[in-house]
Image (cartoon, rainbow, N blue to C red):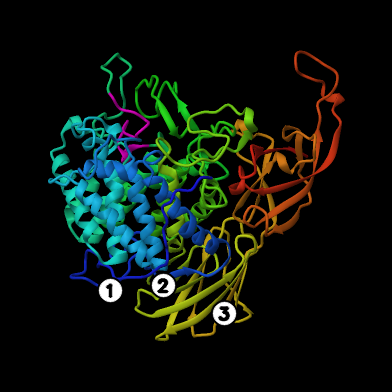
Amino acid sequence: MQRLSVTLTVLGAAVLLSPGPASAGLANRDYGVIKNQNSPHARLKSVNLNDVRWTEGFWAKRFAQTRQVTLPRLWELASDPETGHAIQNLRIAAGMEEGQFKGTHWQDAWVYKWLESACYIYAASGGEELDKQMDQIIDVIARAQQRDGYIASQTTARGWPRFQNPQHHELYTMGHLVTAACIHHRVTGKSTLLEVACKAADCIHERFKQRDPKLADFPRNPSIIMAAVELYRTTGQRKYLNMANFFIDWRGSRYGNGRRDIWGGAQTKGSDLNQNWRPLRKETEVVGHAVFFTYLYAGAADAYMETGDRTLLTALERLWADLVTKKMYVTGGVSPEHKAHPARSLRPGALTIIAGDSIHEGIAAPYELPNDTAYNETCGQIGNVMWNGRMLAITGEARFADIMEHTLFNSILSGIEVDGEGWAYTNPLRWHGPEHVLRSNDTHKRSDPGARMICCPTNLMRTLASWHNYLYSVSREGLWIHQYGANVFDGALLSGRTLKLTQQTDYPWNGKIHMTVDATEPGGVFSILLRIPCWAKHATVTVNDKAVNVPCEPASYTALERTWKAGDTIELDLPMPVRMVTADPLVEQTRNQVAVMRGPMVYCLESVDLPEGVRLEEICLPIKTEWTIQHKPDLLGGLTVLKAKALVIERGTTEDIGGYRQVSDARPRAVEITLIPYYAWNNRAELKMTVWLPAMW
């Protein structure tokens, strides 16, 4: 792959941050990705960004790769006028250079999400050069901002009027600006970007506070809701929280319960695509664009943490159950549709006709989960992790952490090449090789972002750069451990007690996790709460090499309460047998098929791992399959493969009609197959791939 001449040195550092809304003045605190330490309705509080660091293993390698490969590569591409043109757009809007805007209406978000990623890496690793680089692009952003705070190069660089079309995504890009600014302020202690963000938020507040009905379809992609709550948490300015709640309340309020009543009333502009067909609190099912609905629900969860509005939480619980039980892939994917015009005659609970509502990059009907046409945009899965992370903070319930882990390991990591560069927007569960019929944003090969496909690479990068901040939370009970990997936690509990704890493990390839309490001051009783994943049956825990009598039920937390002291050890053993799972029979595309899992990983079969002359489509798995587990440190960045004997069901020779054959002529024979984790597919030429395989009883 061709390299540009731009270089980037990423070294590392940690810094001082601002207080929460309830605090006065500046405090030497480095708050988390969400700053909910003072949120009255959050059961679990974020730990500080510099409290956790990876040490070795799977996630340490991923973080180092993100810092050393992905971050500089996406800067190079953003700086390239022929490829990204993202920085040039801002410079043109600022009057710093001549030229024309290029790219998508959301090209600015590339820069803002890069900045947010750089902040997470800077917090964990430091680096004077990275700090200077952030300062330089912040200067460009500040210059591109208009006097009243408005900033969107997609309009100003073109001389277009503001807020004329929701598809121009002005509020979306400014939402990512505000979020990046909050993180930058926490990590560096600087206010340069935060001042830009406050001016932008003030501009939005002033423009929308009158509830002009012509603006009811803004924001289309509602990143501004999460951003506004985070700006409230960062500055203490209540108007930003009020603005977030206004956008939540406004969405769907204009159109009531539909577009056109059955008696021939006037056509309105409501749409399932952007969830404005009915208000959030009245919605009965998840609909529309996956990024739109996950960002909306994540923002509503943020708002709940501050207000305690039970009507919001009730709706979010209802929608979560609808998504997870009826509309989510086994990999965690949440957007089956590339483009569709559902012909649903009636929506439940309303006398309305819905004719030709155009849905793209979004959800489908219940149990409609096609494999080879699955869109599953990486950004949609990232939005789902953000939503579940906030639901976890509200409730402390393990089911949300389970979804986060499962989605990240499978349908998010699959969006990036194992070498840290080269991206895919779509994450299908079956691929037919070079002859596959391509749909929107499909490709046979992984590619760079550019003029069109710009959002997922930076979104994925900021997720991987910040994942360590999702491992732990604190509460009155003590320290909660949500996710596992080799790392060190060195921070404070809510009681003020300091704690240093080390995880040693080869997770996700091995379910044994060894934890050591390195230091804790002062003494006293508190709990360390361990998540038992939903797949982990017969998990066991020992403390100081002695078994402890605590419940270890799947999809729950087990609390270890005692007076902890330096040198204490915890051993958590999560058995990882190979599992074959089936979908609900109502999922027609997977009926009588199985998917193979081990630990948090979903596995897939690629055609390169079949004997020569055997077609992927001919493979069947006996239910009594015996599996061999083998770690391959030199394969695809290092991973664990599963080997087994499968059956090839070749077509009979006697023609019945057309291309069909009589089954009595089929001759099954055994062949050896090797399955790899789904996240690593599409890294070896243009292969066929499948997650689901026909089962034989």
- Answer whether residue 314 is magenta in the image: no
User: For mark 3, what is the residue?
Assistant: 569
The spot of residue 252 in percent (x, y) is: 28, 34
User: For mark 2, what is the residue?
Assistant: 477
- The N terminus sits in image quarter: top right
Marked residue nearer the N-terminal end (3 or 2): 2
Marked residue nearer the N-terminal end (2 or 1): 1
What kind of element bears circle 3? strand
Amino acid, disc 1: Asn
What kind of element bears circle 1? loop
The spot of residue 81 in percent (x, y) is: 36, 40
Amino acid, disc 2: Glu
Q: Which residues are magenta?
A: 269-283
User: For mark 1, what is the residue?
Assistant: 28
Asked if the residues shown at circle 3 and circle 2 are in contact, with their CB atoms under 8 angstroms apart, the answer is no
Which residue occupies 64% across, 52% down?
Answer: 636
Which residue occupies 58% across, 44% down?
Answer: 330
Does residue 515 appear left or right of residue 187 in this picture?
right
Q: CA distance from mark 1 to mark 3?
A: 31 Å
What kind of element bears circle 2? loop
